[in-house]
Amino acid sequence: MSLNWQISYGITANEFMVYCQPLINAKSGECDGIELLLRWHNPRQGWIAPDVFIPLAERQNLIAPLTRFVIAKVVDELPNLPHCSSFHIAINVAASHFHDRVIVEDLQRIWWPANPLPKLVVELTERDALPVIDQAVVAQLHEIGVRLAIDDFGTGHSSLAYLKDLKPDVLKIDKIFTAAIGTDAINATVTDMVISLAQRLNIALVAEGVETAEQAHYLRERGVDHLQGYFYARPMPIEDFPAWLEQHQ
Ligand code: G
Ligand code: G
Ligand code: MN
Ligand code: NA
């Protein structure tokens, strides 16, 4: 069975799971958001890493169905998640899902009818060619109250021009730049530059891959708004998050 076919089969056979990773507000130390992350386990091959199936799904036009599954799952879980507008839920959305406003239609159909109180953040990865993104779709997302984050910032198809075009609300500093703190002078310089760039443009910052107290301290000192990484919590099944949050508070 080809992996493409396996993905389609896996969607219908309910083999995908939605995990989430907490985001920590750097000022308060509280968790005030989560990022949703797909996981796939099937009885034929065991665990398959997202780095393997996500790029394949993107090429085979299966990424939109997977993202719809993630949105539907978090809608189901809303009753167990914090009911407040200061909490946010971030989903990863592939650039191809922006074509023909498909993402907007999906949110109108699946997300908004649930009357969610948490804010929705759409994370767009820089690995995709962001310049192909239709600015009108981004504007429409902003109009319906969705925040746009650029994921993995500083890697991939980096271009400063689309900061102007896409007007992102959030930049996510890639984990390679977090890992560089205290170890790699060149990449750590990039980390500092991304931080000052975002601050000058009034864009909120999330640092990913925070694994040590030293990194957390460094990033907090420089005014990074949110911290995410194994230092706080590993990705967990979304069903486990309410118990984690209770422990964390
Ligand atoms: O969770 P993990 O670090 O293993 O994810 C690896 C990669 O897969 C990351 O780049 C992440 O953005 C991507 N990924 C995880 N879940 C999703 C998803 O639901 N949709 C998309 N498009 N990418 C995802
Ligand atoms: O969507 P994105 O590419 O940002 O996905 C984040 C990925 O980073 C996920 O696959 C997640 O499992 C992984 N991750 C989250 N926290 C850490 C961390 O502290 N260290 C490392 N190495 N990876 C992390
Ligand atoms: Mn992400
Ligand atoms: Na990332």
Image (cartoon, rainbow, N blue to C red):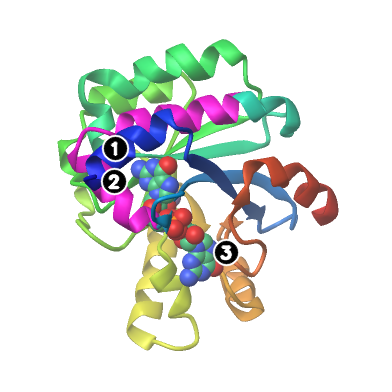
Q: Does mark 3 have its CB less than 8 Å from ligand 2?
A: yes
Label 3: element kind: loop
Q: Tell me the mark number nearer the camera, choosing from 2 and 3.
A: 3
Marks 2 & 3, CB-CB < 8 Å contact:
no
Mark with earlier residue (2, 3): 2
What is the x, y in percent for residue 177?
Answer: 41, 72
What is the x, y in percent for residue 243?
Answer: 80, 47
Indicate yes or no whether the magenta region holds residue 78: no
What is the x, y in percent for residue 28?
Answer: 75, 54
Residue 229: give its label.
3
Residue 163: give its label.
2
Q: Does mark 2 have its CB less than 8 Å from ligand 4?
A: no
Task: Give above or below for 208 relative to 18.
Answer: below
At label 3, the amino acid type is Gly
Residue extent of the magenta highlight? 49-75
The residue shown at (55%, 10%) is 113
Near mark 1 (Cα within 10 A), the count class, few <14, some 14-19 or many ≥20, is: many
Residue matched to label 1: 166
Label 1: element kind: helix
At label 2, the amino acid type is Leu
Indicate yes or no whether the magenta region holds residue 59: yes
The alpha-carbon separation of the residues under discs 1 and 3 comes to 26 Å
Pick whichever, 124 or 49, lies toward us: 49
At label 1, the amino acid type is Leu
Task: Give above or below for 148 relative to 27.
Answer: above
Q: Quadrant of the N terminus?
A: top left
Near mark 3 (Cα within 10 A), the count class, few <14, some 14-19 or many ≥20, is: many
The residue shown at (44%, 63%) is 195
